[in-house]
Amino acid sequence: MFDSLSERLSGIFDGLKRRGALKESDVSDALREVRIALLEADVALPVVKDFVNRVKDKAIGQSVLKSVTPGQQVIKIVHDELVAMLGAEASGINLLGVPPVVILMVGLQGSGKTTTTAKLAKRLTEKEGKKVMMASLDVRRPAAQEQLKVLGEQIGVKTLPIVAGQMPVDITRRAMDAARLQGFDVLMLDTAGRLHVDAELMAEVKAVRDASQPLETLLVADSLTGQDAVNVAKAFDGEVGITGVALTRMDGDGRGGAALSMRAVTGKPIKLAGFGEKMDALEDFHPERVASRILG
Ligand code: GDP
């Protein structure tokens, strides 16, 4: 995902390291190139500006320029600011509530919502020993409920039996009753998506949210859609209130802008990253590791 950005940055920083002593103008020139590299990676302009200003403020201080290894110090500052931009600490899925804890999965159609629901259910079952039930509330897309059921069978996670003709809020209530009565720890609700954010979609998601009182509302967004993914997250957060983001298709050759801008623009953490279609291809999003990968 970050290959071309990573290559650009390493070219810029190799130049700085080779130089030994640095003048203020050397740092400014390098940061101008960093700015272009980030914009070309599709990072949102205000995020880029803020990032470059922060690095500049810290790097142009005399202690950095007069140090023995000024180039290294500048790179360290860039690294630290990159981690801050990505969200500093890794933040896991919050399960601290009275069971069944509800995790609401929201997002546009095709973003990878159903796949991510199943991947996360598998992870919570296998790694955290939770008893998880999944329910699909997607009554629009033909076979959407069936798709979740098939995935559930594949990963050994129970899905709520399908009742034809039931509406999302009614399915939600039935799922909550079933999860409570059958002693499940976690109930994952996979909502319907649309091709675009629209009022009807938001009204439906809000009704489900109110009926289920989720502990986590995760926005599933396709990282390959760049800044659009960030705008979708902003829209969902404004309307529904999200607690975090799951970025899918991080295995693709996108430019990385979505991952880099998401936290700064929405204020919400990226909690999960999807790296493929397989049920195991889901990882926690670690800002520190991602920053290190970008800087090589
Ligand atoms: P939904 O409409 O949001 O529920 O999307 P789906 O879960 O049905 O996913 C749409 C397609 O994207 C499916 O073919 C998935 O296998 C694929 N997909 C989901 N997540 C990822 C990912 O992280 N990487 C890749 N390469 N494909 C993914």
Image: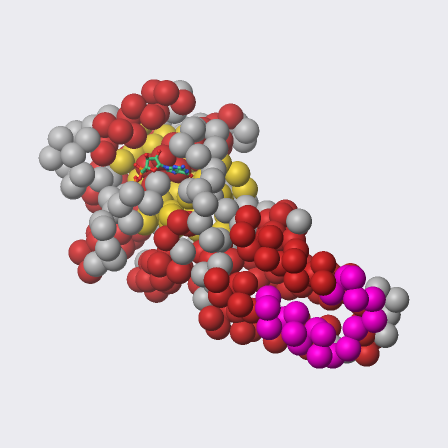
Q: Nearer the viewer, residue 68 or 167?
A: 68
Expressed as whole percent of the image width and height from the top left, the position of residue 103 reads: 39, 43
Q: Quadrant of residue 82?
A: bottom right
Q: Nearer the viewer, residue 198 or 290?
A: 290
In the image, residue 125 above or below residue 96: above
Residue beneath the point at 23% across and 32% down:
145
In the image, residue 203 above or below residue 53: above
Going by the image, does 163 lie left or right of 222? left
Q: Nearer the viewer, residue 72 or 266?
A: 72
Going by the image, does 15 lie left or right of 129? right
Q: Quadrant of residue 99?
A: top left
Q: Residue furthest right?
A: 68
Task: State the extent of the magenta-drawn residues as a range.
Answer: 16-34
Image quarter for ligand 1: top left
Q: Is residue 28 magenta?
A: yes
Q: Nearer the viewer, residue 225 or 120?
A: 225
Residue beneath the point at 43% across and 28% down:
279
Expressed as whole percent of the image width and height from the top left, the position of residue 92 reads: 54, 45
